[in-house]
Image (cartoon, rainbow, N blue to C red):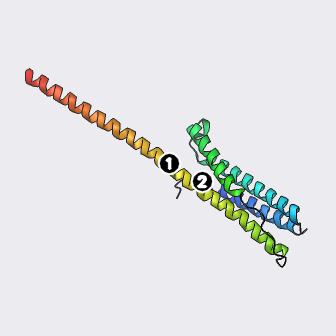
Amino acid sequence: MCFAKRDPRVLASFRVLSHNLVDEFFDTMENEPEGAQMEAVLAETKEKFIKDAFKVMDNHIQENSPETLKESSPLLQEARQEVRCRIQRRSVSTSLEVQNPEESIWARALRQFLGILQSFLSGCRDALTWLWEKAAACLQAICSAVEALWEVLTDFSSFVGQLLCRSLIQV
């Protein structure tokens, strides 16, 4: 679960883009493309959907990131690129299955469009899992560093305290 606020304007823009993409997809399907044409339509739809999703993700990050992260953060850029790769890796794996001759063009279009969405969701799930693992590892490393500093400072304080006690006893 993410605790960052979700900008309703950014999410609404993605809803609009997604609805427009569905309209375009089904408008194209009315021409009943077959074989390679169907594959091209699906590939173009996937590409547009992913492009729109990444644009929304980038806008959301820009709207919700502190100024210091927006300006220059190699870690943020690296994470964004890895998320893109993970989502795309999953999304390109969908392919056309053997067609059932009794299946209508609309049933096939719906099945294939749902396949696009499913592969995208799977990629998002993979990316979120990776992000949570990286965040946990990063926080663990920071906690470990702070604990080490705490231990050194505690030992140092104890040493200084003993030193001062010895000095007071000698005086």
Q: Is residue 170 above or below residue 52?
A: above
Which numbered circle lies on residue 135?
Answer: 1
Q: Which residue lies most toward the right here?
A: 31
Front-lying residue, 107 or 1: 107
Give the residue type that dot 2 points to: Ala
- Residue drawn at (37%, 39%), measured in percent from left and top? 146
Residue 13 point in image, percent of width and height? 71, 57
Q: Which residue lies most toward the top here?
A: 171
Give left or right: position of 40 versus 127.
Answer: right
- Residue drawn at (21%, 29%), measured in percent from left and top? 159
Q: Real-space Cα distance between discs 2 and 1?
A: 12 Å
Q: Which residue lies most toward the front here?
A: 98
Q: Can you say which quadrant of the picture contains the C terminus?
A: top left
Quadrant of residue 165 within the rendered picture: top left
Q: Secondary structure at mark 2?
A: helix
Which numbered circle lies on residue 11?
Answer: none
Disc 2 target residue: 127
Is residue 74 visible in the rendered structure shown here? yes
Is residue 67 visible in the rendered structure shown here? no
Q: Earlier in the sequence, mark 2 or mark 1?
A: 2
